Image: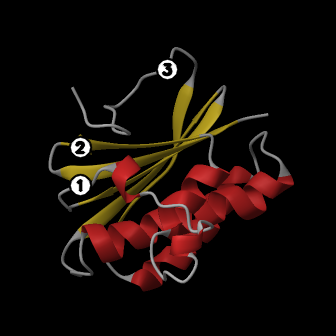
Amino acid sequence: MTPAGETGPQRHDDHERVAFERLIPSDIREIEPIVEQVTRECRGLALTARQCALNVPVALTEALSNAILRGNRGVREKHVRVRAVVSDHALVLEVADEGTGFDLDACTIDPTSPGNLEREDGRGLFLMRSLMDRVERYADHAHNVVRLTLNRS
């Protein structure tokens, strides 16, 4: 059994194809080019303009930032794998780092609550969960994986 908010890899019965897969060093300068490339791929899908311009880039930027800075602790020799899988029903983004993992529910805070308004951290997971239809975390071999799912229109 996995902790709350964590699942294992899921398979779907519909047609899936890997639209994008890259392995990058843990360097925040790698985030923008990856997000731009994935955003370009999104435009060819049945996603709304808002999903391509806001949901995907913001959620993916947050996931990559967390993987590089928190999961891999900024150690450049460690890598982050980014994968986009397109199915008949969804766009699934997976960001895998070499970190130890975390409890998704315990680490997600509501930055709009009075006690959290002045905090500078904790907004990434909240944003991902607000912008995507589903956010999951699971362990895959030696990697911590965050899976972001956005249903296609």
Residue drawn at x 34%, y 33% as measured from the top left: 7
> Residue 92, position in %: x, y?
54, 41
Residue at which label 1 appears? 101
For residue 101, side relative to residue 55 (left or right): left
Mark 3 → mark 1, Cα distance in angstroms: 25 Å
Amino acid residing under circle 1: Gly
> Residue 142, position in %: x, y?
15, 50
Which callout, 1 or 2, points to the residue nearer the camera?
1
- Vertical relation: 141 (above or below) 73: above
> Residue 19, position in %: x, y?
55, 45
Residue at which label 2 appears? 139
Amino acid residing under circle 2: Ala
Residue at which label 3 appears? 12
Which one is earlier in the sequence, the residue at label 2 or at label 3? 3
Task: Report if the CB atoms under discs 1 and 2 are less than 8 Å apart.
Answer: yes
Residue drawn at x 74%, y 42% as measured from the top left: 45
Residue drawn at x 24%, y 32% as measured from the top left: 2
Disc 1 secondary structure class: loop
Which of the pair 40/55 is nearer the observer? 55
Which one is earlier in the sequence, the residue at label 3 or at label 1? 3
Q: Where is the N terminus found, in terms of image quarters?
A: top left
Mark 2 → mark 3, Cα distance in angstroms: 19 Å
Mark 1 → mark 2, Cα distance in angstroms: 7 Å
* Residue lying furthest right: 49
Q: How is the image coloured?
A: secondary structure
For residue 81, side relative to residue 152 (left or right): left
- Vertical relation: 88 (above or below) 41: above
